[in-house]
Amino acid sequence: MCGIMGYKGNKNAVEVCFNGLKKLEYRGYDSWGIAAKDKEIEVFKKIGKISGTSIKDIVPKDFRIAISHTRWATHGGVTEQNTHPHISNNRRIAAVHNGIIENFQELRKSLREKGYTFHSETDTEIIPILIEDYMKQYDFPEAVRKTLLDLEGSFAVVIIDKDFDGMIAARKDSPLVLGIGENEYFIASDIPAFLEHTKKVIFLDDNEMAILNKELEIRGVQNNNQVQKQITIIEWSPEQAMKGDFEHFMLKEIYEQPAALKRAAAESDEKLSKIAEEINKGFGTFFVACGTAYHAGLTSSYIFSKIAKKHVNLSIASEFPSYENFITEKTLMIPISQSGETADVLGAVKSAKKKKAKICSVINAAGSTLDRLSDERLYIKAGPEIGVASTKAYTSQVAVLMLLAYAAIDKLDYAKILLGEASKSIKDMLEDKEIEKIKRIAEAIKDAKSIFTIGRDINYSTAMEAALKIKEISYIHAEGFAGGELKHGTIALIEQGTPVIVFSANDHVKKETISNAMEVKARGGLIIGIAPEDNDIFDYWIKVPDFPEISPIVNIVPAQLLAYYLAVFRGNNPDKPRNLAKSVTVK
Ligand code: F6R
């Protein structure tokens, strides 16, 4: 949700920022801009995606200090005026911002009364103008601090002043991370932006501001006291954040699943058992998550019920406030999040923490805000996920949560063997022959008005997740249902040739699932079976390995591929679906 990148050092700052922005484009791609500083501040802005643009055509000069932004529009349409960076009236200050300033209307009104003019509809523009106003009394760092104290809402900001040899960055409820190189600094919304330059990072915490001048200084926004921060060395390699030979990140990430599952399965027994023990003794466990991560939670709630015989509560993070009354200091909250920056998840965690609940997170991004808010954490170790549609993070989340359920009954060894075998079989499933079949199906259904997906028991969530994948990247209307539910209304939408994807496994609900498929077939539905065995009723059959206990992991892979090819065949870029951004850092 908006990507920020800033640089100060001896390299060509505009080029460093431009290349960094390309890696952050998954956070927003409505428009992008750069402000670079020499004697004056120069601003360059463009509508649309950054990829495919050559920076040399736009910024012919060389600068040492620059800030930049790729936008996911919140306040104001996709126009050049609304594109960041925004600049003060005296053109001395430029700022980029991710987040939402909730009191921007009041601040803008009072600045207008003082005679300042605004050129955009954004909330961000008040930041450089407010700094300009405070600079009538204070120096740049203090004027920034005073401005930050006036802001309500969430922000990650990076600001330059034409007369200041560096930049100032600050955050509250939006991610920002510093990269430390040799005599150079990077500041970005996410690590892949500068991973090719340095693996040394400092994670800024809420209400901290980093003053990058000759030296780096970090201060508390509230009290202006200096803060000592630790440098963390990142394990990810730059290659992991690149597409390699794949046409899209999404495809690369689908193919990375066998390796990611192996890494997830290598989680220490001791750590899993410790958290499983917390679940066993906790008085109320709440899984909270959004979107795909919520579907991982849904799958796991079934696995916990069946395997660990343990009831867990599950809430969409933004709906969690309705459950707050049940949270006590005995509650265990398990937030599930790839990015660890999803605002709705962080909101739920913060309210649970107020009631002293324990937080054990399932996260991909180490060092993220969620990581730092947690008492315990399990990393899914999927590696950087850049494609907006989550794939490998989902299967790794299900894998880690399944390990937890088996750890709760002391059967971790069995679960790890299962995952190891599933990882091998998924690799086979990704062979060319299988892919060709999936492509043929995608070609046959790519003009469908609607696609329905059904599954029962642990594959109910597979149906939900498959529908989400299809709709978010192919833009075909898709809905996922529990197999038994379609006949309670939605079956009215089945017409001759309506594609219905049926997820089945060799388990106790197989017969009922096939019966549900028959009900659809009888009304003209085109049945695509994703199952270990063929069935007469399937018009198309995609064979998956036979792992009933963890069928959600193997079953979702062909559905991810089907969604991918549907998007490609319809001319969409699956890595950058319209209206979406990878981490949703606004509520
Ligand atoms: C869909 C997708 C989203 C995310 C959701 C939560 O493909 O990626 O639904 O799963 O926005 O994001 P995280 O896991 O980062 O909290």
Image (cartoon, rainbow, N blue to C red):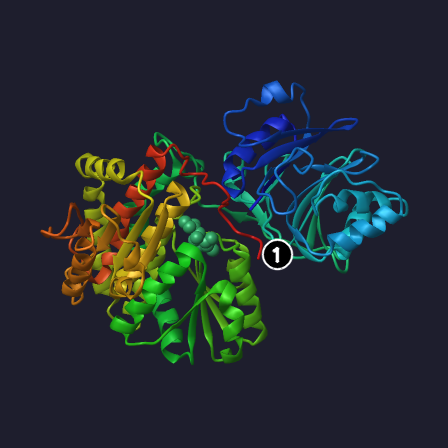
Instruction: Establish if 397 lies above or below 375.
Output: above
The answer to which of 491 and 322 lies nearer the viewer is 491
The answer to which of 265 and 5 lies nearer the viewer is 5
The answer to which of 137 and 571 lies nearer the viewer is 571
Instruction: Establish if 10 lies above or below 581.
Output: above
Quarter location, residue 42: top right
Residue at the spot 11% in from the left edge and 50% down from the top edge: 534
Q: In terms of secondary structure, where does tag 1 sit?
A: loop
Task: Report the side of 342 relative to 294 (left or right).
Answer: right
Residue 236 visible to the viewer: yes
Task: Report the side of 447 relative to 533 (left or right).
Answer: right
Residue at the spot 86% in from the left edge and 45% down from the top edge: 133
Residue 481 lies, in percent from the top left, at 31, 60
Residue 267 visible to the viewer: no
Task: Report the side of 133 relative to 427 (left or right).
Answer: right
Residue 399 lies, in percent from the top left, at 31, 58
Q: Report the residue marked by disc 1.
A: 173
Mark 1 nearby-residue class (10 Å; few <14, some 14–19, many ≥20)? many
Quarter location, residue 132: top right
Residue 472 lies, in percent from the top left, at 41, 46
The image quadrant where one finds the C terminus is: bottom right
Task: Report the side of 148 relative to 565 (left or right).
Answer: right
